[in-house]
Amino acid sequence: MARLPHPPKFYQALHQADHRYTTGLYIAPGKKLLQEALDSLPGEAFHAILYAEGAQEKAWPPALEAKAFPVPAWQLRRIAGLESPEGVVTVLRLPEPAPLAPPFPLAVLAEGLQDPGNVGTLLRTMEWFGFSHLWLSEGSVDPYHPRVVRASMGSLFRLQVQKIASWQSLLEAYDGRCVVADLKGEPADELDWHLYNAVYLGSEAHGPRQAPRHWPRVRVPSAPTNRADSLNVTIAAAILLYLACRATTGKLRT
């Protein structure tokens, strides 16, 4: 039986951000993420495929067989951090960050998003509406946190995602055309979205505190009877990205 490249505790420690960036690795538990990685990433992005001992089904191509290692089921659960990791955990290499330079792509700038599920769902929403880059401020959750990876359902593998060490430096250098989601902004459906290629999101608790003041503010219109104080950030993002996509493509998938 082939030996693991590293002890099991090495892979279990990939739940910690420091260890991920020291090693350049992250984990993607489950069959769905393995298949998405196979469909989306080159072979060199795979460090290892850890699968439960005794499993008969092998869903990876022969070219990756040398990177596949059986481990006891109980150990696989510890590595995945899940009671049911579906018999497989894929260990992937962190991608090189994309340069922050013109021409600026369709992007989301997100300040202070700390919930992994929200960030993973945001990535799926961005891919659906054609936005290719997510930049996260310091203080946000790490985009390669296992819960973000799971919630993204594979979108993480196809988008450029980066947590920025100096958010203010990014904002000073950023030359894209960005609108800011703000409860005090103008109705988003009245904006000429043809003029913009990025959306700035703040956390539900604090809003867009660091967004440049000269960037236009927009809000999602609400019913006259509304008494809720805010929308979930991913719901608000979905509506804004829909409006942006509608303006640029003229038609949308349903």
Image: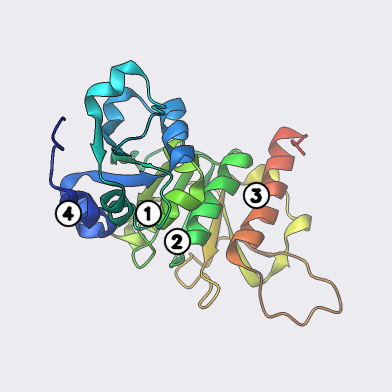
Q: Earlier in the sequence, mark 3 or mark 1?
A: 1
Whether residues under marks 3 and 1 lie with C-beta atoms below 8 angstroms apart, the answer is no
Badge 3, how many Cα within 10 Å: few under 14, some, many 20+?
many
What mark, if any, has residue 146 been given in the picture?
1
**Which three-letter amino acid code belongs to the residue tagged 4?**
Lys
Badge 2, how many Cα within 10 Å: few under 14, some, many 20+?
many
**Which three-letter amino acid code belongs to the residue tagged 2?**
Pro
Q: Earlier in the sequence, mark 4 or mark 2?
A: 4
Which secondary structure, mark 3? Answer: helix
- The residue where tag 3 is placed is 241
Q: Earlier in the sequence, mark 1 or mark 4?
A: 4
> Quick check: can you spot residue 64?
yes
Which image quadrant: the C terminus? Answer: top right
Q: What percent of the width, then of the height, locates residue 63?
A: 30, 17
Badge 1, how many Cα within 10 Å: few under 14, some, many 20+?
many
Whether residues under marks 1 and 2 lie with C-beta atoms below 8 angstroms apart, the answer is yes
Left/right of residue 117 with respect to residue 67 in the rendered view: right
What distance separates the C-alpha of mark 3 from that of mark 2?
A: 20 Å
Whether residues under marks 1 and 4 lie with C-beta atoms below 8 angstroms apart, the answer is no
Give the answer, above or below, for where 239 lies relative to 88.
Answer: below
Front-most of 22 and 78?
A: 78
Q: Earlier in the sequence, mark 1 or mark 2?
A: 2
Which image quadrant: the N terminus? Answer: top left
Q: Earlier in the sequence, mark 4 or mark 3?
A: 4
Left/right of residue 215 with respect to residue 238 in the rendered view: left
- The residue where tag 2 is placed is 116
Q: What percent of the width, then of the height, locates residue 89?
A: 34, 42
Front-most of 252 and 29?
A: 29
- The residue where tag 4 is placed is 9
What distance separates the C-alpha of mark 4 from that of mark 3?
A: 40 Å
Look at discs 4 and 2 and give the one toward the viewer.
4
Q: Residue at x 77, y 34 (%)?
A: 250
